[in-house]
Amino acid sequence: MSGNAHLTDDPVGDAIAKAAPVALAAKAQQPVAHMIVLAILAGAFIAFGSIASLVAQANMGDGGVVHILSGGAFSIGLMMVMIVGAELFTGNTMMVLPTLTGDLGAGRMAGAWAVVWIGNLIGSIVIAGLFHAAGGLENGVGEVAIALSNAKMAKSAMAIFCSAILANMLVCLAVWMAMGARTIPARILAIVGPVMIFVSAGLEHSIANMSILPLGWLAQAGHAPDLAGGLANLASSTVGNIVGGAAVALGIAYGHDGWRKAG
């Protein structure tokens, strides 16, 4: 369908698609100082989600139900990001949409991505370090962190890239649906399902990996961290996340006639 018939079929979907380019462009226009602080907070919130996920798995075996519970625990991190209004790189990959519509310049988008990615990294590392210093990696949590970190580092670049596409398709789907929610409970409900899927499936989220990899390294006392391997993981997962986020934003917006410039 097209035209007015399309608009009356799905008013909520059309409204989100119309508002998304403007909202995403506005995020990139913030003062850099505000953006970096909000990005550091988002990295911290996702790190808290990573910690919750590890705690949920500690001493619980390796069954599917445990992974689903772990995914539910991790989703708390994205809930905090969305409700507080922090800046998360993986969600901001959808800025390709306002760049396409002409609401945002490509240079501004790239600059915003760089600032937020770095801020997310800072927040993630700080929380991972504090959790380690607080003794949080004891009682089986450290063992889970080591196993998860090693599994991520063992993947090939192509596996990480493909996994990251899938991960951010789900994350951006959660963010997109939360954009249409009018209440906090509705936002929470929109976030839980997609995030639970990506975590329980072991998919690669670059910002989550910014805390998971350091936590795994910190849990291995006396072992030098594989920084080169960690950076390679982040590079592949970052590119895959961009592809996945772009695919969701552009695909949904196109389906709802949202590729036109706002106004």
Image: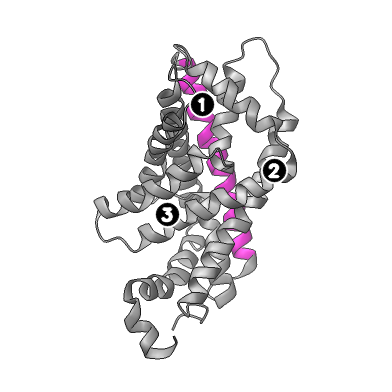
| Local SS, label 1 | helix
Q: Earlier in the sequence, mark 2 or mark 1?
A: 1
Residue 191 in the image, given as x and y percentages of width and height: 38, 50
Which residue is disc 2 drawn over? 159
Kindly identify the amino acid type of the residue bearing the numbered disc 2.
Ala
Task: Report whether 21 appears left or right of 189.
Answer: right
Q: Is residue 170 above or below residue 42?
A: below
Q: How is the image coloured?
A: one colour
Residue at left 68%, top 31%?
Answer: 153
| Local SS, label 3 | helix
What stretch of residues is rendered in magenta? 107-133
In the image, residue 160 lies in the stretch drawn in magenta = no
Residue 189 in the image, given as x and y percentages of width and height: 31, 50
Q: Quadrant of the N terminus?
A: bottom left
Q: Earlier in the sequence, mark 1 or mark 3?
A: 1
Mark 3 Cα shell of 10 Å, populated few (<14), some (14-19), many (≥20): many
Q: Earlier in the sequence, mark 2 or mark 3?
A: 2
User: Looking at this view, is 6 or 241 the one in front?
Assistant: 6
> Viewer-nearest of labels 1 and 3?
3
Task: Report whether 208 appears left or right of 237.
Answer: left
Q: What kind of secondary structure does the magenta stretch mostly adopt?
A: helix
Kindly identify the amino acid type of the residue bearing the numbered disc 1.
Ala
Residue at left 55%, top 48%?
Answer: 167
User: Looking at this view, is 9 or 252 the one in front?
Assistant: 9
Which residue is disc 1 drawn over? 128
Residue 263 in the image, given as x and y percentages of width and height: 43, 84
Between marks 1 and 3, how big is the CA–CA gap? Answer: 25 Å
Kindly identify the amino acid type of the residue bearing the numbered disc 3.
Ala
Which residue is disc 3 drawn over? 174
Between marks 2 and 1, how big is the CA–CA gap? Answer: 25 Å
Marks 1 and 3 in Cβ contact (< 8 Å): no
> Viewer-nearest of labels 2 and 1?
2
